Amino acid sequence: MPMDSNDKKNNVGKSKNLIRSVEFAITGVKTVYKDERNIRIHTVCAILVIFLGLLLRLNRWEWLWIVLCIFLTLLMEIINTIFENVVDMVTDKHFHPLGKKIKDVAAAAVLFTAVFSIIIGAIIFLPKIFQLIIH
C-alpha cells in the first residue's frame, strides 16, 4: 500500500515517542490481519489449541511450549509478509527469479515453524487425548 504525502511527512526517521511507536506497531498488526489470510488461519488454530489446552489442563511447561509455538508461527507469518511486500515493492509486482526465491524461502520458514508447532502439539496433546479415550 503506497504512502501518501502525509505518511511520508509523519514517518520520516525513527519515532522518539514510545506511544507513537506502539501506535505504529498496532497499525502493523491491524494491517497484517486485514491483508493476510494465513495469519488469520494461524490465529484460529491458536485459539483452538488454547481451548484444547484449557480442556486438557496443561501444566506450566506444556503451556510454555504451546505459547512459544503460537508466537513463533505468528511471528514467522509476519516476517514472511514483510519479505513478500518488500519483493513486490522492489519488483513492482513483476516476476523476478530472485524475488520468487526470496518469497519461497520465506514461506519455507513459515512451513518449518508450523511443522515444528504441529510436532510439539502432537507430543503434548496426543498422550492426553489417548488417556481420555482409553479411560
Image (spheres, rainbow, N blue to C red):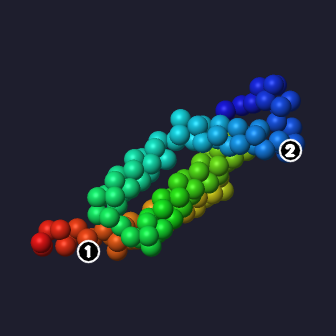
Q: Quadrant of residue 115?
A: bottom left
Res. 16 mark: 2
User: Can residue 76 be seen from the camera position used here?
Assistant: yes
Q: At 44% from the left edge and 70% from the top edge, which residue is drawn?
A: 60
Indicate the amino acid at tag 2.
Answer: Lys
- Judged from the image, the secondary structure of the residue bearing numbered disc 2 is loop
Left or right: where 14 falls relative to 33: right
CA separation in Å, label 1 and label 2: 50 Å
Would you place residue 36 above or below residue 107 in this image? above
Res. 127 mark: 1
Indicate the amino acid at tag 1.
Answer: Pro
Res. 112 mark: none
Q: Nearer the viewer, residue 33 or 46?
A: 46
Give the crowd class for mark 1: few <14, some 14-19, many >=20 residues within 10 Å: few
Q: Quadrant of residue 66?
A: bottom left
Quarter of the image for the C terminus: give it: bottom left
Q: At 12% from the left edge and 73% from the top edge, which residue is drawn?
A: 134
- Judged from the image, the secondary structure of the residue bearing numbered disc 1 is helix
Left or right: where 54 falls relative to 23: left
Q: At 19% from the left edge and 73% from the top edge, which residue is drawn?
A: 131
Q: Earlier in the sequence, mark 1 or mark 2?
A: 2
Quarter of the image for the N terminus: give it: top right
Q: How many marks?
A: 2
Residue 94: x %, y % from top left: 64, 41
Residue 31: x %, y % from top left: 60, 37
Q: At 82% from the left edge and 25% from the top edge, which residue is drawn?
A: 5
